[in-house]
Image: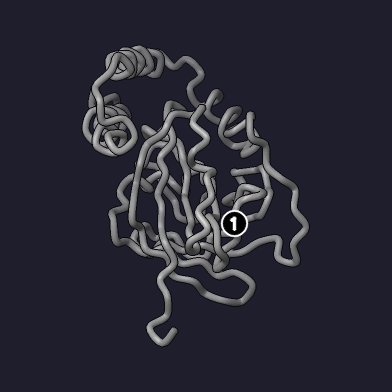
Amino acid sequence: MMILVWVFWPIVSFSLFTSPVLSAVVSPVQNDENSGDQSRLFSSLGALAIGIGAEDESTLETTNANTWFPTKPQKKIVTSVTAYTLSIPKLGIRDAAVIIGGDDLQKSLIHYGGTGLPGEYGTAVVFGHSVLPQFFSGTNYKSIFSTLPSMKIGDDIYVTYDGVRYRYKVFDMIVTKPTDLSPLEQRFDDSYITLVTCVPPGTLWERLNVKARLVKPENS
């Protein structure tokens, strides 16, 4: 019984407490989707309890970045820089590899091809895989974004791109549906980064978007 609680609690907690708060930014009006989400929560917990291939489904559908937004595929762009690193001190993530236009989330974070580049005007969109937060590891790319929901407004994200270190500060966090393409939207009034992963932890139901803005050097 204790094992079931240990496994299910992060999913239940996120679905009942965290997701409604973050989703309110997008959908402030109560609608029938909420009851549908609750039904899906309990049916999925039942499936997990009897071991119906949850891990296999997750691996097949979420470790390939090209399946995340099939209606808006990545753009293959030619750039002199093909990879960079990302650090989130609060989460214990240090110099994680980010591959531009990559697809295998088991080997790195993925910068979605065609989105803005770090330090430039636009929005860099970075995907990372997640599992239950109990299995988080800052060096294992299958679990690297498992604790992303614990981020708060004002937290720092560091990116080292082409030899330059950039500091971004979180200003917004929202939850969107898998069919919602808004996480890929570009803003060109400044340099932004959006980190995207699946939530609730260990499921494929929704996408958490952590949005951050470049912090300008004080002497600029």
Measured as percent of width and height from the top left, residue 56 is found at: 55, 25
Query: At 60% from the left edge and 44% from the top edge, which residue is drawn?
Result: 106
Measured as percent of width and height from the top left, residue 163 is found at: 61, 76
Query: At 21% from the left edge and 33% from the top edge, which residue is drawn?
Result: 17
Residue placed most toward the observer, 86 or 78: 78
Query: At 54% from the left edge and 43% from the top edge, which residue is drawn?
Result: 184
Query: At 62% from the left edge and 39% from the top edge, which residue is drawn?
Result: 65
Measured as percent of width and height from the top left, residue 118 is found at: 56, 64
Residue that carries the numbered disc 1 in the rendered image: 116
As shown in the figure, which amino acid type bears the numbered disc 1?
Gly
Residue placed most toward the observer, 8 or 24: 24
* Residue 6 appears anywhere in the view: no
**Depicted 211 relative to depicted 165: above or below:** above
Residue placed most toward the observer, 65 or 171: 171
Measured as percent of width and height from the top left, residue 156 is found at: 37, 64
**Depicted 201 relative to depicted 147: above or below:** above
The reply, left or right, for residue 115 in relation to residue 169 is: right
Q: In the rendered image, which quarter is residue 79 located in? A: bottom right
